Amino acid sequence: MIEERRPKYAASKAKISGFEFDKNTLELGYVAVDADHRNKGLSVCIAARLVAEQNDKLFATTSDEFMKKTLARVGFRKRGDDWKGRKGILSLWYKPAMKTKSPD
Ligand SMILES: CC(C)(COP(=O)(O)OP(=O)(O)OC[C@H]1O[C@@H](n2cnc3c(N)ncnc32)[C@H](O)[C@@H]1OP(=O)(O)O)[C@@H](O)C(=O)NCCC(=O)NCCS
């Protein structure tokens, strides 16, 4: 899901990672696939759909190695430095706004 705008939260992630981005950036939040249906490309489908619907810059944080692959597949890049969170080593992922094609 795309989280509601949380400027303070976004700013805290920019600070902890050392990667500066607009604090009004929306977050691609927690993605979960039922254990019986994992490794079939579903999280890539879900994330790609959310990214396409949003059509704007987004950020995400995760400690999950499979989720990192998913984020990379849909246009996010790892930015800044990792940090230690409650659930492990977290990293910041950022996807710039897609360029809209100008009419010819
Ligand atoms: C993370 C999660 C959402 C991935 O969902 P998924 O539908 O199984 O993932 P996909 O099938 O779309 O695969 C995404 C990538 O991970 C890889 N992957 C997924 N499961 C894998 C497994 N068991 N072994 C090896 N690779 C695996 C896929 O090959 C793919 O990589 P690729 O792009 O290089 O091919 C799922 O594992 C999950 O729900 N985990 C628990 C919740 C969680 O931690 N969510 C992330 C919080 S931000």
Image (cartoon, rainbow, N blue to C red):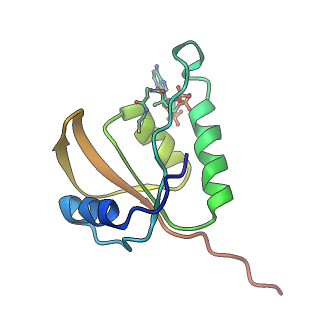
Q: Quadrant of residue 20?
A: bottom left
Q: Quadrant of residue 54?
A: bottom right
Q: Residue pushed farthest left? A: 84
Q: Residue at x 29, y 67 (%)?
A: 11
Q: Position of residue 83 (x, y in %)?
A: 18, 48
Quadrant containing the N terminus is: top right
In this view, 23 is above or below 13: below
Q: Residue at x 27, y 59 (%)?
A: 13
In this view, 7 is above or below 76: below
Locate residue 24 relative to residue 2 in the image: left or right.
Answer: left
Q: Position of residue 77 (x, y in %)?
A: 41, 56
Of the pair 60 and 8, the residue shown nearer to us:
8
Total marks drawn? Answer: 0
In this view, 26 is above or below 3: below
Q: Residue pushed farthest bottom? A: 104
Q: Residue pushed farthest top? A: 36
Q: Residue at x 29, y 48 (%)?
A: 91
Of the pair 38 and 32, the residue shown nearer to us:
32
Of the pair 78 and 62, the residue shown nearer to us:
62
Q: Position of residue 53 (x, y in %)?
A: 68, 57
Of the pair 87 and 41, the residue shown nearer to us:
87
Q: Residue at x 62, y 50 (%)?
A: 50
Quadrant containing the C terminus is: bottom right
